[in-house]
Image (tube, coloured by chain):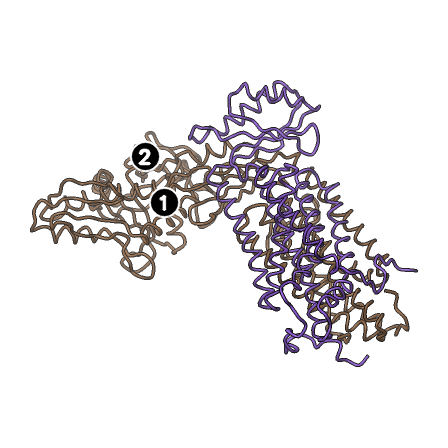
Chain colours: A purple, B brown
Amino acid sequence: MRLLKLIPDNTNIGFVRLRAWAFGLTALLTIAAAVLVGVRGLNFGVDFKGGVMIEARFQTPPSEDALRHDIDQLHVGEAALSTFGGANVYSIRLPNPQSNDEGATNRLVKNVQNVIAAKYPGVTFNRAETVSGKVSDELIRHGLLAVFLAVTGIAIFSWIRYEWQFGVSTFVAIFHDVLVTLGFFALTRLDFDLNIVAAVLTIIGYSINDKIVIDDRIRENMRKYRQMDMRALIDLSVNETLPRTVMTSLTILLALGALLIFGGPVLRGFTAAMMLGVVVGTYSSIYVSSSLLISLGLKPQLSEPRKKSGPPDSAERVG
Amino acid sequence: MLDFPRWKVLWIWLLLLTGVALAIPSLMPDSVARQLHLDGMSRISLGLDLQGGSHLLLEADTADLVKQNLQKMEDAIRTEMRRADPKIDIGDISTSNGQLSFFVRNVNQLDAAVEKARAQTTAVGVTGQRDWNVAVVDSTRIVMTPTQAGIAASVDNAMKTAIEVVRKRIDELGTREPIIMGEGKTRIVVEVPGFQHPEQLKALIGKTAKLEFKMVDMNADPATVTAGHAPPGDEAAPYPDISQPGGPTRYIAVNRRVILSGDDLIDAGLAKDDNGQPAVSLKFNASGGRKFARATQENSGKQFAMLLDGSVLSAPRIDEPILGGNAIIHGSFTTDSANQLAIALRSGKLPVALKVIEERTVGPQLGKASIHAGVIASVIASVAVIVFMLVTYGRFGFYANMAVVLNIFVILAVMAILGATLTLPGIAGFVLTIGTAVDANVLINERIREERRRGRGIVQSVELGYKEASRTIFEANTVHAISGLIMLVLGSGPIKGFAVVLLIGICTSVFTAVTFTRMLTAGWIKRHRPTEIHI
């Protein structure tokens, strides 16, 4: 049986040659993402904004305006409506009630549910969530802290493990990945909730995984070919790892694709973020972190002699 | 590298098969597990987002607790100074600015007053720091300030009681399996699966239980009391034996008249009696102390009963009149049972106000739909990845696929052993793990292909493939684990569920994807000595 080979043997694509273009594109993407996040903002769910969320499943898709009108009658603040996984499922977001007593939010939820149930027979309520401002502030803080710690922790790891240039290039590339993902959420106005923070952290994990594989190969080749030009060396390393990069990205995209289509509406935002992250992370491994190593002045001669720990390099073996 | 001794092979298989066996109970529906008597085995529990239910996050109002403490201290100081011999005359008591300050009218009594005040403080923690600072200001005024350590200890104590109180009240719902646990220093998480009415939960938590002290009727006939008949003026009160939960409930006859109520009891705690045996100390407020003194004077030698919501907690005998407002109940307590009784006595009311700061309710249909979707997505993802690996790497892909399938079981087994909860993001973690676990095999197989292209022999290519890829795999997994750990520590609810699966998956996949496939490959090469490999 002939086996599938997605990438032909011994490719020699000049990735580094396109470096200037890639940097331009990267800068453009990053700035666009930052502007989008700054201007349009993220569509924070109740996790991060605080408030009340009710998810209602209707027998037949209701008119959004009519639904908004029905809720407005209750004078409970401005309702944010969005469909959730289908035209007949709506998530209704409301600000927290002014009153401070314990039952106020329950009454608010009951009132809204009663009004909707009266107007739209057969409606069922999937979820109801109330998050106080205190908790949502904390969740934002923790989420930001988690992302910050993950990015810096991983950058420090690559700095200690390899030359400092790897730490810096990894940091920049991951920062880019996170920003582009956030930009995507600002652009699409998809709900940004706790799950998305998990997705962002996973993207960081995946993206760094990808970079380490290439960085590892670059280092291996730096020891092997001490006189080689850095550009050629990076091209060689990226080309050598290309089949793996493509295979792994594809298997993960396959798995995530199944989740996106069949995993149900609750996970859709999460999965979309992950898929985007896989693509962006793969791109930044090749074009941001690896190419940046040249700009940061990494040279094969700088590589320290063979480490005592770890396996000996393959060039010194008789084959 | 490719040399696997027989014992090692046996161990690897044994470990993996144990994993599969431990995962099986979690995969069956409840009813099947019960029929096979497997429900005693550890199984994975489903998060609220998958089975539906209510989730509340409660936060203690610590400011209120500090205020209560000040109030209690004020009461205690008033009582103590009045009781002193000679009586210490104090005035102008204030509890503003978070401290208690009062004026001692007779300067000569200042030292005695300070001593009395100090006697009201207790040591906290190992450092021996007191819970209150006592200072003299302007040589006439005593100022008592709670210390940080004192406040922390009091919050800690209050939270322990509060968790017990909440647990008791939620338990009244019946046989659901509620989760009530502390989170951080001042929070309590309440999760009740399958329960869609958070407002009822709130009402239950907010209600006040009734603690009463009543005299036991020593003349009642035990047999008729057990049958539920009490003499006139009495009532038959259930008296559960706390050392034997679930055992038959005893009944005793108690007088209907309430001699003391929960409001009169300031505190109850674990203490030691004169012989050093565990005991329970009771502390009453001024009026409670007077009532208790009178009751014990009149009823020496008889028993009194302490009832919480009509059920008897303890019925000690009165050995002698207790006049000081402090009592010690001793008898056949163990440290545990004394502590239990103390908590039960304190749980008459919540020691601190609790506020709901987060509330989530998931309907049962949504949970079912989510599980269904999650299972379908997992199966499709697995099949897609398996086919893809098979057409790309042939035999080596097949080995990787075996590793992936076994890995799924092993993750489930580890989760079951750890008692981890599977949430919807956890399912996403599963699907992602399926995708990333094969990365290790992709790395290895691509390396083998590369080494073959460079013209190395089969055995050496395979050996080098595993060797070189292992380093990369180890490093890549380490950084992956870093982000997973951060999620586990900082994340709440859903993120935690995701991180648990991710972390377990990272650990187990190294074993299945590297060690296990290497063993399979080594076995095949040893047996068949292939002259060419398709990879």
Query: Whole-Å distance between the Cαs marked 2 and 1?
Result: 15 Å
Is B51 left, or right, of B218 in this rendering? right
Q: Residue at x 29, y 60 (%)?
A: B128
Residue nearest the viewer, comparing B473 with B201:
B473
* Label 2 environment density (alpha carbons within 10 Å; few <14, some 14–19, many ≥20): many
Residue nearest the viewer, comparing A3 with B420:
A3
Instruction: Please name the amino acid that badge 1 sits on.
Output: Ser
Residue nearest the viewer, comparing A61 with B86:
A61
Percent of width and height locating residue B19: 69, 59
Instruction: Please name the amino acid that badge 2 sits on.
Output: Asn
Q: On the image, which quarter does residue B274 sit in?
A: bottom left
Chain under callout 1: B
Residue indicated by mark 1 = B314
**What SS does tag 1 mark?**
strand
Dot in front, 2 or 1:
1
Image mark for residue B170: none
Q: Can you name the residue that lies furthest to the front here?
A: A20
The quarter of the picture where the C terminus of chain B appears is bottom right
Percent of width and height locating residue A203: 65, 52
**What SS does tag 2 mark?**
strand
Q: Residue at x 31, y 56 (%)?
A: B124
Q: Are marks 2 and 1 on the same chain?
A: yes
Q: Residue at x 46, y 29 (%)?
A: A103
Chain under callout 2: B
Residue indicated by mark 2 = B255
Is there CB contact under 8 Å for labels 2 and 1?
Answer: no
The quarter of the picture where the N terminus of chain B appears is bottom right
